[in-house]
Image: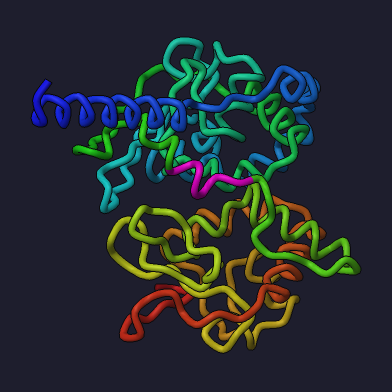
Amino acid sequence: MGLLGKLAVAALAVGAAGAAAFWLLTIPQSLSAAQAAALGTGDARRGERIFHAGGCSSCHARPKAAGSAQLELVGGRELKTPFGIFVPPNISSDPTDGIGAWSLEDFANAMLRGVSPEGRHFYPAFPYPSYARMKPADVADLFAYMKTLPAVAGKAPDNKLGFPFNIRRGLGLWKLLYLSDQPVIALAADAPEKVRLGRYLVEGPGHCGECHTPRDFAGGTKSGQWLAGAPAAEGSGIVPNITSGEGGIGSWSETDVAYYLETGFTPDFDSVGGAMVDVQKNMAQLSADDRAAIAAYLKAVPPRPNGYPAKAKASVGGS
């Protein structure tokens, strides 16, 4: 065999090895049998709290839905991002078009691992990088509650993604970099339980960092700029800095933060606006203790410089 032939064989071998490595590294990782068994059965009454903390209706209800229609989780809203257009699916209890035929294990794999019942990666426009920090029992409670909500027929449109973002398998590499069940902010061993609860609600089901943290070129959140504000994922507008520093909510007291979450009014007599309107409505459904815990955690987050361009302005009120 000549030199060119040997080089060709070597190139094929390297390519085959690379393809095999890619295939192995990107295999969707589901819960183990022991982890699935530990989920329990779930309690719908407790699950309602997690539903509001997670703001499920904000993405999965019809646009401008109000009242009881907010519990019709038919999906269909469009999220326009630099990677393409993502469309939240129907997650109602409809067995054909929604998730009514899912098992608890299916649901937990989606929430904690970003894996579908068919064993495919979900795109992280579904904020499972945050949900991965949730307690399995809370996932089971949420599923129990969602099964009590109306079954609504109708499939949402497909995502509109170009190459290479339409290759789901590559998300396995993305998960290796960005998917973790560990807290973002380390707390002192003697941190108050209220702050620990707030960390769980914000970093887990509340998934606040998904919008309030800037992202890198691959779309992963920059943990070093946690909650420092970011350009809106839709490409228009700014999501504000909510750390405890000067650029964020440093002048707010814990009481101010909790009151804002309950009523939508800021200490400056401004009112909630934009996408935060739906979030605040969800927060108002939580208990006063939960809102106080969120406030305590946000005031404990280290101050960060704004994560958006200096010329841009953001407000937690009307803009």
Residue 227 is at least partly visible in this image? no
Residue 270 locus on image (x, y percent): 51, 79
Residue 257 is at least partly visible in this image? yes
Would residue 169 appear left or right of 227 to someone viewing this image? left
Q: Residue at position x 65%, y 57% from top?
A: 202
Would residue 247 appear left or right of 284 to someone viewing this image? left
In the rendered view, would you say 53 is above or below 25? below
Residue 295: quarter of image: bottom right
Q: Main secondary structure of the magenta part?
A: helix
Q: Residue at position x 87%, y 61% from top?
A: 193
Would residue 34 appear left or right of 96 to someone viewing this image? right
Quadrant where the C terminus lies? bottom left
Residue 105 locus on image (x, y percent): 65, 19
Residue 155 locus on image (x, y percent): 35, 21
Residue 65 locus on image (x, y percent): 44, 41
Q: Is residue 179 magenta?
A: yes
Residue 19: quarter of image: top left
Between 137 and 169, the one nearer to me in the picture = 169
**Magenta extent:** 174-180
Q: Residue at position x 31%, y 56% from top?
A: 234
In the rendered view, would you say 249 is above or below 15? below
In the rendered view, would you say 183 is above or below 32? below
Would residue 295 appear left or right of 281 to someone viewing this image? right
In the rendered view, would you say 260 is above or below 147? below
Q: Residue at position x 23%, y 36% from top?
A: 160
Q: Is residue 127 magenta?
A: no
Residue 301: quarter of image: bottom right
